[in-house]
Image (cartoon, grey):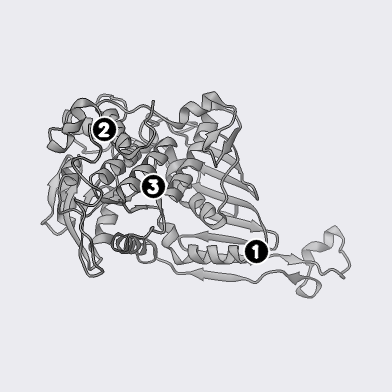
Amino acid sequence: MTHRLSRRKFLQAGVLAKPMAWLSASSNQRVLGSNDRVRVGFVGLGLIGKRHLLDFKAQPDVEIVCVSDVYPPRLAEGVQAAGGKANAFVDFRKILDRKDVDAVVLSTPDHWHALGTILACHAGKDVYVEKPLTHVVREGQWMIDTARYYGRVVQVGTQQRSGQQYRKCLELLRAGHIGDVQSVRISACRNILPGFSSIVGQQSLGEENWNLWLGPAPFVPFDPRRCLYHFRWFWDYSGGQTTNLLSHDIDIVQWVTQQFPKTVTAMGGRRTLKGIGETPDLFEAIYEFPGFLLTWSNRETASRFLGGVRSGLEFVGTSGTLIVNRSGLEVYPDHVMPADAQIPRFDETRHMTQEASTLRTTAFKMDGFEQIRDQFQPHVRNFLDCVKSRQAPVSDLEGGHRTATSCHLANIAMKVGQVLHWNSEKEELEGNVEASRLLTKQYRTPWDRELQAVLSSAGSPTPS
């Protein structure tokens, strides 16, 4: 699908004759003062896209200029939610061509996050991009190189970093409140049996819109079961719930500890849900970090989990346990025998009293949080402030890249059925050619030419 806008004329030769000849890093970007309004365009108006639109709209210094979606009903909903005055486009690249747009919010399916961000940075826009940041590992470095070259601010949609309870989690753990972290457990469990069906009432997108929806992904004939939320069940567009749900909590783990996995093993598959989809409905992964072990448990066929907790993040330390989720945070201290106490017999341990033991840490609790007010809108506010100050946002590209990479590694380990050894400094898998091939992918033409042209201009290694 060839786009006929003049800013893509450089693609006729396949490469840029003069990098940056049509656009400098600042020629299409206003220098914003603290009181200026930030003019925003929205790409993708689904479940999270509409949430972002409303959260941006709630900010006093935001002007919603235009919206884009390939599905006409959602495009109409977006215009209405924006107040009825925003320009509407099916092709998001028309937003990138507008000089009256300062920033773009990308809430597309996962396989569009990297290329959409790269093209937006190249067009002189700051970007708020939903997680997972990437569809394959190598896309992350391409995004970082492009954003740095064009001087763009990019916020990743791992909104938990803006939540008060997660900031408190960081404070407590770094202060050693539960001692040394030994293990981390992350879970996400629900029951959606009997499974999925085609989306009722969805009309065909038409050849042109469907082709744009697929973008860099391999071509397949239109199928409504691949669209909207259902894209998560196909490897061509997503990494399943491991990149969707694990990314939220493993991002917090890596943000708090500043550690990254060195060994990963995983098992899972499509076991119960039938009819459509490829990504696992049952998944178990074990990560070895330098200082602790992390387990990830996910299933779509039973909602009960150990202790009755269906989802959340649990840090286990040498003197207590910290559990944090979007409802709040709680610390459970461990009772520890004093050094001069007589060690009880095994059958007496359950009857230990406060007098017979001591606490190495103290109980702590925070609750009563509301996701929109306490997490989503502060994340938007942080992005807007950074657009004006040109400072790095709380969820920067580097952090988003490492988070997505950890999720991808679990999927790769499951696919090849092997234990993976990851060198986080070199960003390489050690001694595994088969798994290393899954760190990247080939874009479909003409999107491969668009990618390579921008990466060449930014001095980033181009994919083979």
Type of amino acid at the residue the image marks with label 3:
Lys
Q: Residues within 10 Å of mark 3 (few under 14, many from 20)?
A: many
- Which residue carries the number 3 mark? 131
Percent across and percent down for residue 181 are: 65, 56
Q: Is residue 381 visible?
A: yes
* Labels 2 and 3 touching (C-beta < 8 A): no
**What element does badge 2 sit on?**
helix
- Which residue carries the number 2 mark? 450
Q: Which residue is found at the position 41% from the left and 53% from the top?
A: 396
Compared to 203, does 317 lie above or below?
below
- Kindly identify which numbered label has been placed on residue 101: none
Q: CA distance from mark 2 to mark 1?
A: 49 Å
* Labels 2 and 1 touching (C-beta < 8 A): no
Type of amino acid at the residue the image marks with label 2:
Glu
The first of marks 3 and 1 along the sequence is 3
Residue 333 image-quadrant placement: bottom right
**What element does badge 1 sit on?**
loop
**What element does badge 3 sit on?**
loop
Residue 194 image-quadrant placement: top left
- For the C terminus, give its image quadrant: top left
The first of marks 2 and 3 along the sequence is 3
Q: Nearer the viewer, residue 218 or 198?
A: 218
- Kindly identify which numbered label has been placed on residue 178: 1
Q: Which residue is found at the position 51% from the left and 28% from the top?
A: 436
Count the labels in the image. 3
